Each structure stands twice: as C-alpha cells, then as structure tokens.
Amino acid sequence: MDRTDIAIRLFDRAAADYAAKYMDVGRYAAALDRLCTALPPDAGVLEIACGPGNITRYLLDRRPDLRILGTDLSPRMLELARANNPEAAFALLDARDLGRSAATYDGIVCGFGLPYLSPEEADRLIEAAAAVLRPGGLLYLSTMEGDPERSGPQRSSSGEGEALHIQYHRADRLTATLVRHGFTIVDLQRAEYPAPDGSPVIDLMVVAQR
C-alpha cells in the first residue's frame, strides 16, 4: 500500500478527531485575512486538501460572497466539510491532479496539504496553480517548515496506530518556485509552537499573486 492510500485510510479514520482539534484556524488568521482582503468580489476559489472544511468555514465567515470548491482525497473529510459548509461545493480530487483542470480560479488555497507532498510534487502543484489561476489570482500555501531531511514516517502524539509520512518544506525553495512560475510573494508569515515532545514546530504561511 502506498503513502497516499495509507493517508486516505488514516484521515478517514481520524476525521472527527481532526475536526475537533483543528476547526479553529485562528493561529493562521493574519495570512488568511490577507487573502480575504485581496480576493475580488464573488471570487471563484479552489481549495485543495480542504479536510473537514476548517479553512473553508473561516473564509466564508469573512467573505460569504466567495464561490468555493473544496477538494480532498478523504471521503469522510469531505462529509464533514459539507456539513460544516453547506453553502460551498465539494469534490474528491488528488492535489497532484490539479494540472488536469480545465477550470480557472481567482484563488487557490492549500492549507497544510504540502506535508503530504514531496518537494517535487509541491513544485508541480505550484506550476499547475499558475496555469489555472486567472491574471492577478492568489495562491495561499501553508505547511510545516523544516529541513527535508527530517521528513519521514510519524505517528500521532499518542504513539499509536500507523505511521504517516510527513514531508517538511523549506521556505526558500517554495518561494523560489513561486517566483519562477510568475508569482509575486505578497505575504509570508510563520507561527512557532511546541510539539507534544517539546520540540519547536514552525508553520509557514505564504500568499502569492500571479
């Protein structure tokens, strides 16, 4: 079984617990507010790896005019996202298939989808996003920042269950890829907090404009 299949099974199983833990996205409010301010009226937004619809809910509470299509690979996550955001649309989609999209958008949001993509897959996601964003379109990315050498299988804080491969990304690589594909960085923020074992975790949030 490959990493994607394992991730789908684990997220299906843990969807309710994940929603209970992460529905509050206040830690990332500043970057999300920057996105909300910059999107045009009635903007069409594609959300990749939407999970239980936590970021979707935050965006719609502040910009109810947004037309959001949320996507994820976990059917159970999509069920929760629909329940939490009845005014949005949702569909099953692999982030790695974005390049096949025939639709275009004013904004693309990928909140913590990158920890499940390799650096090369993240590069291709940014390239595909550039192709489907309308002129002036905005891309929001958030991920765990760190040395890619730290990447590997990780278990939950309880130490139980299957391990899920977690990929760390470097800010300089992501921003260089964004610039290479015609983006301008309009906001870059970090949030640091302790992991259960006391080690520091750095979350990276980037807003870029095409």
Image: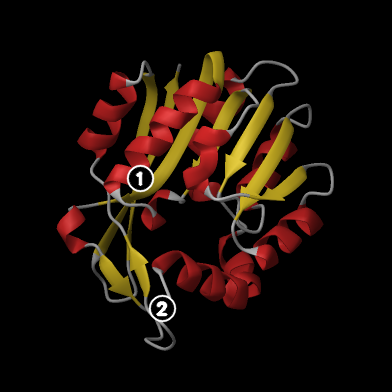
Q: CA distance from mark 2 to mark 1?
A: 24 Å
Q: Which residue is mark 1?
A: 121
Q: Quadrant of residue 150?
A: bottom left
Tag of residue 156: 2
**Residue 82 shows in the view:** yes
What crowding class fits label 2: few (fewer than 14 Cα within 10 Å), some (14-19), or many (20 or more)? Answer: few
Please tell me whether residue 64 is drawn above or below residue 89 in the rendered image.
above
Mark 2 element type = loop
Q: Quadrant of the N terminus?
A: bottom left
Please tell me whether residue 78 is drawn above or below residue 39 in the rendered image.
below
Q: Position of residue 6 (x, y in %)?
A: 47, 73
Q: Position of residue 108 (x, y in %)?
A: 55, 32
Tag of residue 208: none
Decide if residue 90 is on the left or right side of residue 120: right
Q: Position of residue 115 (x, y in %)?
A: 38, 55
Tell me the amino acid under the disc marked 1. Answer: Glu
Mark 1 element type = helix
- The front one of 176 and 188 is 176
Decide if residue 48 is on the left or right side of residue 127: right
The residue lying at 48 percent from left, 29 percent from top is 129
Tell me the amino acid under the disc marked 2. Answer: Ser
**Residue 206 shows in the view:** no
What crowding class fits label 1: few (fewer than 14 Cα within 10 Å), some (14-19), or many (20 or more)? Answer: some
Numbered disc in front, either 2 or 1: 1
Q: Position of residue 196 (x, y in %)?
A: 34, 75
